[in-house]
Amino acid sequence: MTDHQGDLELSLLRTFLVVVRHGSEGRAAAALSKTQPAVSHRILRLEKIIGRKLFARTRRGVKLTAHGEMLVDYANRAIDLNEQTLAGLRNESVSGRVRLGLGEEAVLGRLAPVLMRFQRAQPDVELKLKVVGPAEFDFLAARGELDFIIVDPARIAGQAVIEWASHLGWFAAADMSLDPISPLPLILSQNADSWREQILGALRTAGWEWRIVLEGANLDTTIAAVESGLGVAALLHDSVGHTAIREVKPGRLPALPEVNFGLFRGNSAPTRAKSLLEAALTASLKPAMGQRPASFAEPQPWLLDDQPKRERISIS
């Protein structure tokens, strides 16, 4: 039970999501055509109703607290339900087709919930997903065959609506152990082609040798190979899901780079359905910027001693 009772106001939730999307109250105020004190006052009112802090202030803007992260999903669902209810009562419906292109390295782990929520809220919208190869992005976007694209910003021309970072981790079977004086058995997924040199460079810098035991597999095959104990793979945390594989404990293997993604608009004409999907995607993906999974700790590279230890290293 909190000290400050009250109902959640949709206007406050909308302001909260705009602050999340823009990463600062100042930029949110400009987007809303309001003063920064007015936006700050709305956030304080929302925090008073909930009885929890939603943002931590930093020199670069604001960062979501744990309770703020929880509220993002609830706020999106509340606003989606409000729009769905009003449209139903007014006998209004949004229809049309929205085509979302995904780069081969992108995964649906973070996207699936928001796309499912959007489809429930807008059942008359035809949502089509297409996995796009590296050479196709600009071509399909220019021809108006894709409405949105989610891809590494380095792979496409143009300005992203938003950009965010995802985190790579080393994953292995739960009972696998690592031998620092033997070549690391490495599985390279075709999804990781963009980061191949960064992955191998991290191993090279840390003094690890490796041997590639499987290369060019799709994501499902890669995870199955890791589960079987065939080797270790560098995977996006969002791509692993509820599988039997485990992340290698930080410090056992070298730190891996962050991977950048961006949401880009295609060259097609705007519609109400596209505007709604863009709003849903930006509100859900913005919290990913600059935030690490709770289990992620900054690992130190594994440095081989002058006299390397010969015992095997557990992954956990």
Image (spheres, rainbow, N blue to C red):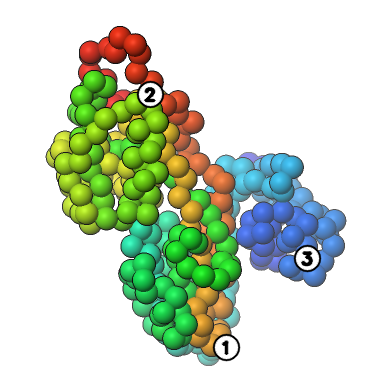
Work out how far the residue at label 3 is from the one at label 1, CA to CA, in angstroms: 32 Å
Residue 42 visible: no
User: Which of the 4 image quadrants contains residue 286?
Assistant: bottom right
Q: Residues within 10 Å of mark 2 (few under 14, many from 20)?
A: some
Vertical order, 209 against 259 (above or below)? above
Frontmost residue, 17 versus 226: 226
Vertical order, 191 against 85 (above or below)? above
Q: Amino acid at mark 2?
A: Trp
Work out how far the residue at label 2 is from the one at label 3, CA to CA, in angstroms: 46 Å
The tag earlier along the polypeptide, 2 or 3, is 3
Vertical order, 259 against 263 (above or below)? above
Q: Amino acid at mark 3?
A: Ala
Image x and y of residue 276, in percent: 54, 76
The residue identified by callout 1 is 90
Residue at x-position 82% and y-position 66%: 34
Identify the element where label 2 is drawn: loop
Frontmost residue, 190 versus 55: 190
The tag earlier along the polypeptide, 3 or 1, is 3
Identify the element where label 1 is drawn: loop
Residue at x-position 48% and y-position 37%: 294
Image x and y of residue 54, in percent: 66, 47
The residue identified by callout 2 is 302
Image x and y of residue 83, in percent: 57, 76
Residue at x-position 33% and y-position 69%: 133
Q: Quadrant of the C terminus?
A: top left
The tag earlier along the polypeptide, 1 or 2, is 1
